[in-house]
Image (tube, rainbow, N blue to C red):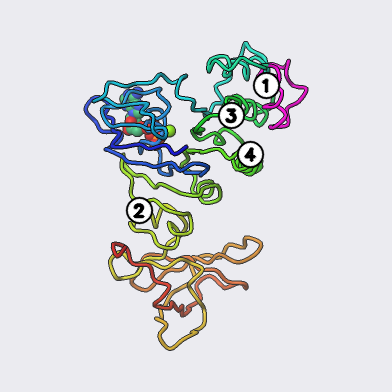
Amino acid sequence: MDIEIRGIHKSFEGTPALLPTDLKLRHGRFTTLLGPSGCGKTTLLRMIAGLEQPDGGEIYAEDQCVYSIHKKIDVPAHKRNFGMVFQDFALWPHMTVYENVAFGLKAAKLKANLRQQVTEALAMVRLEGMEDRYPHQLSGGQQQRVAFARAVAIRPALVLFDEPLSALDAVLREEMRIEMMSLVKDMGLTALYVTHDQVEAMSMSDEIVVMRKGEVLQRGAPERIYEAPSHPFVASFIGKSNWLTVDQAMVRPEHVTWKRTSEEDECYQATVLSVSYVGERYEIRLQMDGLDPWTAYLDKRKSVGERVNLYVSPQSICRMGEE
Ligand code: ADP
Ligand code: MG
């Protein structure tokens, strides 16, 4: 089932949190809203979920309208058949694991074979045998698995994630990222995921929607967003960019070479500012003559203060505003 958002917008006390926004979430696809804190991601997600009232616009789940001001339609959250996973897990502290997962099914009026549905959902997230525990008896990762099980047990048309991994430490976060991604894919779920973490967005998504100040700046596959950003903000927010003298033109660090490879290569002079060894390579910060500092990669060490020449092929330069 495709989900379509048309012209949804919202202000708080006269200040726009989200400008009119269109978004199409294709069936079985993983879409991510990526942007800095305060850009309107949660507001958009909560309006789709039915937890926040939009100022205008429409939301469709396939042919069914679930929200429209003009048509006076506002299907309540628990009847939209959307699952939701929050940053703080939002488990009921006085309920056991079993009761937490069963709660979502009961609210959605899916009580037939309740025990079997809960058991299956918990097996999926590898929490068999934990039915009688309370949230405080679980680790952060286990709590988030319960929240995930609760959200997907109802077999939702759409599952909404609001920064679900940001309360976890770095190692667990990466583990859970991979686990959640494969569960979503295996179950064929349509997902909308919110994060301010570009690595999460790049590694999980079929499509990324980059936002800033209540507005969508660019949308597309992760590779496209990285290789052909259409806006300087997108280029700076995702990955590292080395800016050139030409307005709105940059080159990614992996395209900066230390030897001329072609006659057409442009040459840039620089001084080594710092050298960071990161295992598989050295990351070198460079003071550029007449430009802001750059980052480049190398397989051997350089000395700080060393003068170097760098080369960039014209084809690897990304110019913005030429979409
Ligand atoms: P994000 O999730 O991207 O960090 P939010 O959607 O939470 O951003 O917030 C977008 C903007 O709307 C922010 O400026 C925030 O302060 C404001 N905002 C969000 N919720 C409310 C609210 N309930 N009342 C007033 N302002 C709000
Ligand atoms: Mg938020």
Q: Judge depth for marks 2 and 3 and give the one in front.
A: 3
Which label's residue is closer to the chain start, 2 or 4? 4
Query: Circle 4 is placed at which residue position?
Result: 183
Q: Outermost residue, left direction? A: 14
Q: Which mark is residue 152?
A: 3
142 and 153: which is toward the camera = 153
Location of residue 185 (image quadrant):
top right
User: Marks 4 and 1: CB-CB under 8 Å?
Assistant: no
Which comes before the other along the chain, label 2 or label 3?
3
- Amino acid carrying mark 4 in the image: Leu
Q: Residue sitting at 42 percent across and 62 percent down?
A: 241
Task: Confirm or deny contact between disc 2 and disc 3 (CB under 8 A).
Answer: no
Label 1 secondary element: helix
Q: Amino acid at mark 3?
A: Val
| Residue hosting label 1 | 118
State if disc 4 and disc 3 touch (CB < 8 Å).
yes
Q: Which residues are magenta?
A: 115-137
Mark 2 Cα within 10 Å, few/some/many (few <14, many 20+)?
Answer: some
Position in image of residue 283 (x %, y %): 55, 64
Element type where label 4 sits in the image = helix
The reply to whether dot 2 and dot 1 touch (C-beta < 8 Å) is no
Measured as percent of width and height from the top left, residue 308 is found at: 48, 78
What is the distance, in whole Å, between disc 2 and disc 4 at their CAs? Answer: 32 Å
Q: Residue at x 41, y 65 (%)?
A: 242
Of 306 and 277, the residue lying toward us? 277
Which residue position holds label 2? Answer: 233
